[in-house]
Image (cartoon, helix red, strand yellow):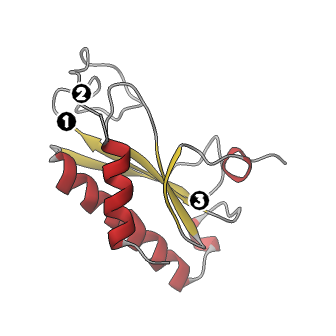
Amino acid sequence: MACDLCDNTGGKLLWQGERLRVVYIDEPGYVGYCRVIWQAHVAEMTDLDEVSRAHCMRVVFTVESVLRDLLKPDKINLASLGNFTPHVHWHVIARFRDDAHFPQAIWGERQREATARETADLADNLAQALSARLRD
């Protein structure tokens, strides 16, 4: 069976280790939308051993911390869904009160037009900060 996250990077590559990669998702209206993707095809977090689960969450929390430091969002959303793509991955999304869906999930009902935010060099800045903080 084909898997989009096995066959494709899943976004702009920011950091990659042996077990995980972090990508930037260029989603209009959502600066600071990243995914943490397990490199091997695994459907559920409980398919990973305890050490691997802990490592995955350390990377998720590091991405959250970097987004908070760089963007100063009102909130960070963490989501692990995988209904369409049953491959372990976490969405780490910086949220702002004036984004199009706040306080709903970004997949929820639109609340307003989004406020434009500067994104020049954001992916590069994220990549540099992640490289400084992450080891595989």
Instruction: Tell me what residue is drawn at x 68 percent, y 46 percent.
Output: 8
Q: Nearer the viewer, residue 125 or 17?
A: 125
| Residue at x-position 16% and y-position 32% | 97
Q: Residue at x 47, y 77 (%)?
A: 55
Q: Residue 50 versus residue 63: which sits nearer the camera?
A: 63
Asked whether, in this view, residue 85 is left or right of residue 69, the answer is right
Residue placed at 26% from the left, 52% from the top? 67
Neighbourhood count class around disc 1 (C-alpha, 10 Å): few under 14, some 14–19, many 20 upward: many
Residue 88's tag is: 3
Image x and y of residue 57, in percent: 42, 70
Asked if the residue under mark 1 is in contact with the one under mark 3, i.e. CB atoms within 8 Å, the reply is no
Name the element at disc 3. Answer: loop
Q: How many callouts does the rendering have?
A: 3
Mark 3 vs mark 1: which is more N-terminal? Answer: 3
Amino acid at pointer 1 = Phe
Which of the two discs, 3 and 2, labels the residue nearer the N terminus?
3
Q: Amino acid at mark 3?
A: Val
Between the residue at mark 3 and the residue at mark 2, the CA separation in whole angstroms equals: 27 Å
Q: Nearer the viewer, residue 91 or 47?
A: 91
**For the residue marked with disc 2, what is the amino acid?**
Asp
Task: Please give the residue where the numbered disc 1 appears in the rendered image.
Answer: 96
Q: Is residue 56 above or below residue 2?
A: below
